Each structure stands twice: as structure tokens, then as C-alpha cells.
Image (cartoon, rainbow, N blue to C red):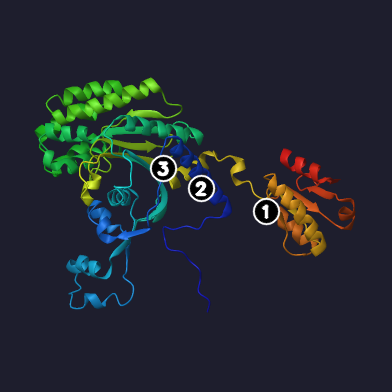
Amino acid sequence: MAQKPSIPKGTRDFNPEQVAKRNYIFNTIRGAFETFGFQPIETPSFENSETLMGKYGDEGDRLIFKILNSGDYLSKADGLAYTEKDSNKLTSSISEKALRYDLTVPFARYVVQHQNEIEFPFKRYQIQPVWRADRPQKGRFREFFQCDADVVGSKSLWQEVEFIQLYDTVFSALKLEGVTVKINNRKILSGIAEVIGASDKLIDFTVALDKLDKIGEEKVKAEMLAKGISEAGISKLQPLFTLSGSFESQIESLKSILNTSEEGKKGIEELAFINSAISELGLSTATLQLDVTLARGLNYYTGAIFEVSAPEKVKMGSIGGGGRYDDLTGIFGMKDVSGVGISFGLDRIYLVLEELGLFPETVTKNVEVLFINFGDREALFSLKAIKQLRSQGIHAELYPDAAKMKKQMNHANKRAIPFVVLVGDQEIESNTYTLKNMVSGEQDKVSLETLISTIKKS
């Protein structure tokens, strides 16, 4: 019995139309990256396990796809007690490699490994797939592309300013207006934790604060109490729960909340600098918004934190994010190399553009003209014309088999090819072509020049 074909959950096949639409997004992002001076690199699909493990926290480590060693991989594991407690030991003995979880840690490894070849500051972009053993859901897959841009070797806040402009440039080019670039700063969060006496509970505090817009003030307070944050400390947060208004007004409120924290003050200064620069430079279609509840990537972000939201009318998670990391390369022994980077969520951007009908019709433009095949003599004559059409940038092809004409015409209809060309003895003798418009049904005998101009004008 033949095996029923299937693919793993969280992965997808892409048909020609979907690939064309994805390439439209890729090309738009790549064009912006290069306009902003970023250079492309690529890294292997899989890394040594030790490169990835321990870099994403316990949850991230669990979501890394491990690759079994080739050969008799269990022979090295002989003698191990295969209990749940020993699972990590077992994994390390039978798997030495893993699929990359993101592009950031492999990039840090790349920078350290190639540091003598790199000119710093180094601006790189990378567009490649990553893999996560996550639970598949709308907009979340186990295999997906990341489109990253990073700068390493500079602590200048002008880099953060440029990344906000880069987001604005890409989404404006995609005609995706109304995008919000949310920004926060790790130093702000650290300062708040310090003020309320919870510096040792920074992660617990920020995880609870991040839920403010989802579960409300009272439940956030209850969660903080449950995590061991004192009532006195939580009461100091009261101004934070009602923080709203313009970027500038929120900055002023934060100054009063963080007036006793040097770390917090530094975060305020950085945010104020970035906002001032963006206000002066202006954005085309995006909006910059301060969001003090934003707390992504705290395991490695040390300064600015970015998250991009789709227009409000679309129910979708973040479509981009990133931040400043002051010592990511330190995990590979290269200390004090500051970096900042952002990522575009290709799959979610695709879903948003699809929902809003923002893909241009020309993106999925396929073959414009199909030459009907009546036999070898006619096919050779047709291919000479097709060669000329292709040199003019026209998408043209010859039906490969001398099948019944009805079958060839049906093929053109099913593929929505707008023109067909018929070539028989008369056309060959007069060096002309019968051009049929598949939409209107009209057909005319034309010269090669008229054939080319007619298709180009359509």
C-alpha cells in the first residue's frame, strides 16, 4: 500500500503564487538593508549544540531541534540510566549538533570566529530559515524565515535611530501604513525594579508587567505579590499603571518615578535622545511609541528594546523586533563588543499583507504568452520568436508536446496566461504570428514587432 504523503506539523509547502509573494517581501527588505549599508552573510543551517544551548533560557533550550549523531549514536550512551533526570546527559551524548534557533547567536559566533577579517563597525544582514520546536498556531511555525540586520562594534545611539528609519522604510515600501514601532529600554526596567526593591526579581517583575494590557492592573499586582514583590514596592508602581500620552509626557512621568535610580535615568536619556532625533527626521508612515511594559529578550538585551505592531485593524502578534545587546559576543570570549539589531517577521508580514490586500497584482505575474505546439517545424519557428520575446523581458514559453489544441488552450486558461500564439504553415511562410487574446477572444495575424509591443502594452 502506497504511503500517504504528509509534512511535519508547523511546516508548509509554498505554491508558485505564494513563493512570488514571499519573494516580493524578501526583495523589499533586502533592498532596504542594502540601501542602509548592510552587507549580506550566511551561516550553516545547523550549529554545534554548545553554540546554541544555554543562550535562550530554559524555555528556549527546550525548543531547539537536536540532530542525532550519525551512525550508532546510542553506543556512546551505554551505561546511562535513561531517567527523565538524565535526559540532558543522554541528549548531549547522542546529539552534538542542532538546527539554529535564531540568526542572532550564530551571528555572534560568526563575528568572533571571523573577527580578524571584519571591519568594525560591522553592518550585516541575513535572510535565512530558522527552526523551533514550538506549538504551531496562526502566524507561528516550526520552520520559518528570519530577516535580520545588526550592527556590532558601535555603542552609538544613532544606530537605534537608523533602525527605526529602516522599519519605516520597509513598511512604507510594502504600503503597510499604520505600523507602530514600540520602544523601551532595559535600563528603564532595571531602574523600576531597583526603585521598588525587586532588582533580584527583574524577570518576574517584567513578565507580570508585560501582561498589563492583557489581564489588567489588579491581576498584574496579584501576580507580582505572588512572586514575592512587596506591597510597598508595588504601590510605588502606581504611576506606571496609568502611564499614557505622548512619548514626551511619558518620559516626564518616568523621570519622577526613576529619580532615585542612576540606571533608570540613563535609560530615560537614551530614549529621549532617540525620540528627539526621530521627531526631527520624521517618519513616512510608521509611528514611534514608548511602551514601558515591553520586555522581550531580557536574557541578552541591555539597552533599547524594539517591537513592531501591525496596524490596529489587523489581529496579529508582533511583525518585527530587536534591541541593543552590549556583550553578546562575550559568550564566545570576545568581550565589550556592543551591538544592536532588528528582525522582520516574514510570515506574519505576509499574512498581514494578504489580509489587507496589499500585494501588487504584478507580484504574481506569470507567463504572459504561450506558443501552441503543432509539431517540430512549428516549435522551432516559435522558439526563435520566444528567444526574442524573452530578450525583451517578456515571460514566454512553448507548450512542450504537440498535444490536441483543446488541451493546450485549456492549459493556458488554467494558468491564466493572457495570450497564446498559433503558428502553422501560413504563419511560417509569411513570417507572421496569430496572436489570440484569451480574455477578449480576439485574434490577429501580426508581425514579431507588433507581437512584442502588444504584449508589452497589456
Nearer to the camera, 155 or 209: 155
Q: Secondary structure at mark 3?
A: strand
Q: Which residue is mark 3?
A: 39
The residues tagged by marks 2 and 1 sit, at their Cα atoms, a distance apart of: 20 Å
Name the spot of residue 167 as percent of width and height, x first: 41, 35
Confirm or deny contact between disc 2 and disc 3 (CB under 8 A): no
Nearer to the camera, 158 or 9: 158
Indicate which label's residue lies in the foreground, 2 or 3.
Answer: 3
Residue in the picture at 30% in, 57% down: 63
Disc 3 residue crowd, few under 14, some 14–19, many 20+, Cα 10 Å:
some
Rendered image quadrant of residue 74: bottom left
The residues tagged by marks 2 and 3 sit, at their Cα atoms, a distance apart of: 21 Å
Q: Is residue 256 left or right of residue 17?
A: left
Confirm or deny contact between disc 3 and disc 1 (CB under 8 A): no
Q: Amino acid at mark 2?
A: Arg
Q: Which residue is mark 1?
A: 415
Name the spot of residue 33 as percent of width and height, x first: 43, 39
Q: Which residue is mark 2?
A: 22
Q: Secondary structure at mark 1?
A: loop
The residues tagged by marks 3 and 1 sit, at their Cα atoms, a distance apart of: 38 Å
Name the spot of residue 58 as percent of width and height, x first: 22, 54
Confirm or deny contact between disc 2 and disc 1 (CB under 8 A): no
Give the numbered dot on residue 173. Answer: none
Disc 2 residue crowd, few under 14, some 14–19, many 20+, Cα 10 Å:
some
> In the rendered image, is residue 148 in sight?
no
Q: Is residue 347 left or right of residue 21?
A: left
Q: Secondary structure at mark 2?
A: helix
Q: Is residue 343 above or below residue 265?
A: below
Disc 1 residue crowd, few under 14, some 14–19, many 20+, Cα 10 Å:
few
Q: Is residue 414 above or below residue 394?
A: below
